[in-house]
Image (tube, helix red, strand yellow):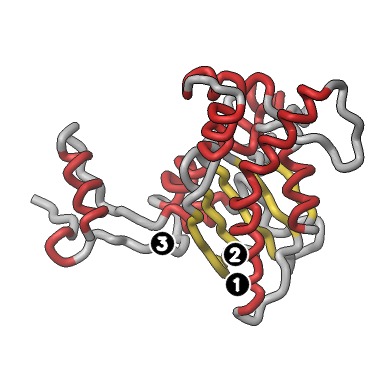
Amino acid sequence: KDVVRAHVEALAAIGAEPRVIGAAALSYAALRGHGYADAGPGGEGETQAIVDFGHLHTNVCVVRGGTVLFARSIPRGGEDVTVAIAEQFRMSPADAIQAKHAQAFLAAPGSAFASPAHQRVDAVVRDALRPLMRELKQTIAAFRASGETGPDRVLITGGAARLNGFVEHVEAELGIVVARLALIADDPFLDPAMAERARTGEAVAAAELPAQALGLALAAATPVPQVNLRKSDLAYRTD
């Protein structure tokens, strides 16, 4: 309740009044037909997990068609990599962020390293992500423990997922097919330039997708499951 109140007060300070404060992990269901198809390559019954790797949190939303089967927010994200780079290479936080964006990577399994420095970068990034990968595995195990099977495919998005080699790393860790979440090429939310990049399969189109923001916007106008945490004395009131 205190967290909801803090959000309401922060928005009120800039003259905004939210009607709904929902659970972030549920917002991705509204991307059905925009960021992922009703049916994946496996057909109508395919179970897909959308995983948004953010700076401080990683949101997981498991869907089948238009139904949310499971959702969880993990309090880990790209900041873990930034902190590790700063500590291991004795950098300032600002320099570590720049180095992460420009030079950090995860080597493909079995690949040779160009130099000892490259091997060290890979090791630092890999170790920093280990707790997050463990949490992600536990999340999928919890989903399966509910009596479900799958997911058949994992769709990843978010700033932390921009790391070179990240798709392959997550796929190797989970043992599940992994791809980037991207808007379909003819989606009306894409401007012409981005649509063309999506049609050619350019990865940047997926990397630049503001999945959570778009999901929240679509959820406001689409009949998808959502939880409104504005209740009782914090409920939205019209004039």
- On the image, the x and y values in percent for residue 144 come to 66, 74
- The residue located at (70%, 41%) in the rendering is 126
Q: Which mark is residue 11?
A: none
Q: Answer yes or no: do the residues labelled 1 and 2 have beta carbons within 8 Å? A: yes
Residue under label 3, please give it.
Answer: 226
Depth check, mark 1 against mark 3: the one in front is 1
Circle 2 sits in a helix, a strand or a loop, which is it? helix
Could you tell which of marks 1 and 3 lies nearer the N-terminus?
1
- On the image, the x and y values in percent for residue 199 come to 75, 30
Could you tell which of marks 2 and 3 lies nearer the N-terminus?
2
Circle 3 sits in a helix, a strand or a loop, which is it? loop
Residue under label 2, please give it.
Answer: 139
* Dot 3 crowding, Cα within 10 Å, few <14, some 14–19, many 20+: many
- The residue located at (54%, 27%) in the rendering is 86
Depth check, mark 2 against mark 3: the one in front is 2
- The residue located at (66%, 29%) in the rendering is 205
Task: State the separation of the CA atoms marked 1 and 3.
Answer: 21 Å
- On the image, the x and y values in percent for residue 26 come to 47, 58
Question: Observer-nearest residue: 137 or 14?
Answer: 137
- On the image, the x and y values in percent for residue 142 come to 60, 72
> Total of numbered circles in the picture?
3
Q: Is residue 192 visible?
A: no
Question: Observer-nearest residue: 106 or 36?
Answer: 106
Q: Which mark is residue 142?
A: 1
- The residue located at (56%, 49%) in the rendering is 31
* Dot 2 crowding, Cα within 10 Å, few <14, some 14–19, many 20+: some
